[in-house]
């Protein structure tokens, strides 16, 4: 069952919250005082509650989780998955069948390539190539990320042995 949450504001103040139960395009029930959403569309995909989309293009078969913000002029391609509490800044883009982990920030004009994967808690400030994987803060390629961690661990062991 599809639900559309609507929050009505007037002069900057919330004057009402409603949840509309949908059967296709027909409203079959309306609940006052609640704000729930879960849109399931055979072509568009799934859009969860509290998603903000500003003048952007969202293609079909996407999954956009809770508390996602998609800034102005952003683009989300077919089959993309964007996990909860993620923010795409203006003019950012997410390629076909790519995956963006939760609590991720994507800066202005940054592109996530087709089939790319972005780990949770990552801050993207530069493009991720098609099929690439980015993790961490600062953003690193997946393989490089583990090389850096291994190096830091070796340095810590050396420091412990020398007593510095």
Image (cartoon, grey):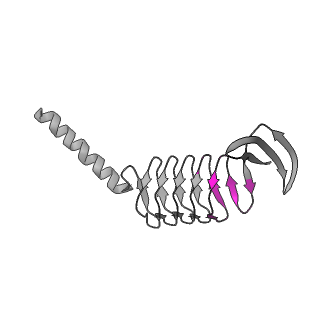
Q: Which residues are magenta?
A: 40-68
Of residues 59 and 88, the one drawn nearer to the viewer in this rendering: 88
- The residue drawn where x is 52% and y is 47% is 102
Q: Quadrant of the C terminus?
A: top left
User: Can you give x and y, in whole percent of width and height, for residue 71 in the image?
Assistant: 56, 58
- The residue drawn where x is 25% and y is 45% is 152
> In this rendering, would 105 be left or right of 32?
left
User: Can you give x and y, in whole percent of width and height, for residue 30 in the image?
Assistant: 85, 43
Q: Is residue 44 magenta?
A: yes
User: Can you give x and y, in whole percent of width and height, for residue 11 in the image?
Assistant: 70, 47
- The residue drawn where x is 47% and y is 61% is 108
Q: Is residue 54 magenta?
A: yes
> In this rendering, would 5 be left or right of 142?
right
> In this rendering, would 112 be left or right of 38?
left
User: Can you give x and y, in whole percent of width and height, for residue 123 in the image?
Assistant: 43, 52
> Most extreme residue toward the top, as rendered?
163
Q: Is residue 37 above or below residue 89?
A: above
> In this rendering, would 149 be left or right of 160?
right
């Amino acid at each position: 069952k599809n639900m559309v949450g609507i929050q009505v504001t007037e002069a900057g103040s919330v004057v009402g919250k409603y949840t509309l139960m949908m059967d296709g395009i027909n409203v079959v029930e309306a609940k006052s005082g609640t704000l729930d959403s879960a849109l399931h569309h055979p072509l568009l995909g799934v859009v969860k509650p509290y998603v903000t989309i500003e003048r952007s293009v969202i293609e079909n078969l996407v999954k956009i989780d809770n508390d996602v913000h998609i800034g102005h002029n952003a683009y989300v391609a077919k089959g993309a998955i964007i996990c909860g509490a993620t923010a795409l800044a203006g003019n950012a883009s997410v390629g076909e069948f790519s995956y963006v982990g939760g609590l991720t920030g994507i800066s202005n004009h940054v592109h996530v390539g087709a089939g790319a994967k972005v780990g949770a808690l990552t801050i993207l400030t530069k493009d991720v190539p098609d099929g690439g994987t980015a993790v961490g803060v600062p953003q690193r390629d997946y393989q490089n990320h583990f090389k850096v961690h291994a190096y830091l661990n070796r340095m810590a062991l050396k420091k412990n042995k020398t007593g510095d």
